[in-house]
Image (spheres, rainbow, N blue to C red):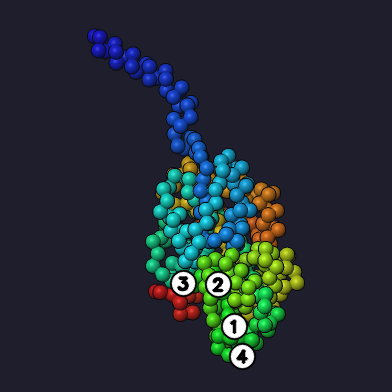
Amino acid sequence: MRGKLLNRVRRWSIWLLAPLLLALPGVATAEESYPARPIQLIVPYPPGGNTDLMARALQTALSRALGQGVVIVNRGGASGTIGDAEIARARPDGYTIGLSPNTPLTAQTHLVPLSYSLDSFRFLCLVYDNPQVLILGRNAPFQDLAGMVAYGRTKREALVYGSPGQGSTQHILIARLLRGAGVEALHAPFTGAGPMAQAALGGQIMAFVESPSIPVSTGLPVAGVFSATRLPGLAEVPTLTEGGYPIIGSSAGGLVAPAGLPDATAAVLQRACGEAVASESFRTAATRLNSVPSYASGTEFRERFAAESESNRKVLQELGMARE
């Protein structure tokens, strides 16, 4: 009889104390309290490149939407694959996410064996979609697209061009251009757009392809736009199509997390991402960088990258660069 009474008292004590315990900090469920601490945002490129600039433009608005600090961590190297591999193997708790462009996810997988694939990530939302531009080095011996082609044809490897990595979106675009122009140039790969832009400023390379934010931040001249129409911020710059090379390409990127991220946590991040992309602070910063804010849901984001991955596989095969 005494044992039954004690059990009944214990049950009533737990029932009465439960609401108080759940109200204490750190006792509520992870889904209810997320995010309870700062979030690490991995950028798979060095500081100063387009991905890094877009992450920093988004940082304040994303922190505000989440109610927690967002700390940017640069993990450059190997055309973005080092940073993306770190995102993929992180604990799927929402405290390590990444801002990844298309290159590490839609091109590099066809060039080298990697520890991840598209299925290694939970796609949260697309953030930007930037048409690429042809940028000239400070001391380049030509001033426009026609001059670059003419110079490149003078002799094999007379033209020295850079890219943020073998098989990157930017490398594919300029390789297609040079192939179409009949130019055999010397390729100098870099760890990202920041170091590459510094090389262009220092005269080590003559041309490269990147997002419009790079000439804005460096003052380097732009010789062409890989877009169907001219860009509003570069209205005086002709498209590649106008120059006789109908090539269109962009660098798009968005927030990703490790696969296995709980739905409730993903929903918090997706909602915050949408608010951040729509914010005036992000749009103002993006416009200042000649970048294009572009929101898409996680599902649409993944579908786009999956389609681009298949397209890149075919292009890389045509260029003789694919490993398949």
For mark 1, what is the residue?
Answer: 159
Mark 2: amino acid: Ser
Quarter the N terminus occupies? top left
Name which quarter of the figure residue 241 lies in. Answer: bottom right
Q: How crowded is mark 2: few (under 14 residues within 10 Å), some or many (20 or more)?
A: many
Residue type (three-letter) at the residue carrying disc 4: Thr
- Residue at image mark 3: 313
C-alpha span from label 2 to label 1: 13 Å
The amino acid sitting under disc 1 is Leu
Can you give x and y, in whole percent of width and height, for residue 237 in the image?
72, 73
Q: How crowded is mark 3: few (under 14 residues within 10 Å), some or many (20 or more)?
A: many
Residue extending farthest to the bottom is 154
Specify which label sits upstream in the sequence, 2 or 3: 2
User: Which of labels 1 and 3 is toward the front?
Assistant: 1
The quarter in which the C terminus is drawn is bottom left
Secondary structure category for the residue under label 3: helix
**Please, which residue is most extreme toward the right here?**
236
Secondary structure under tag 2 reads: strand
Disc on the earlier residue, 1 or 3 = 1
Residue drawn 54% across the image and 48% down it: 71
Query: Any mark on residue 163, and which?
Result: 2
Q: Residue at x 64, y 71 (%)?
A: 201
Look at the numbered disc 4 and give the secondary structure of its residue.
loop
Q: In this view, does 202 lie above or below 298?
A: below
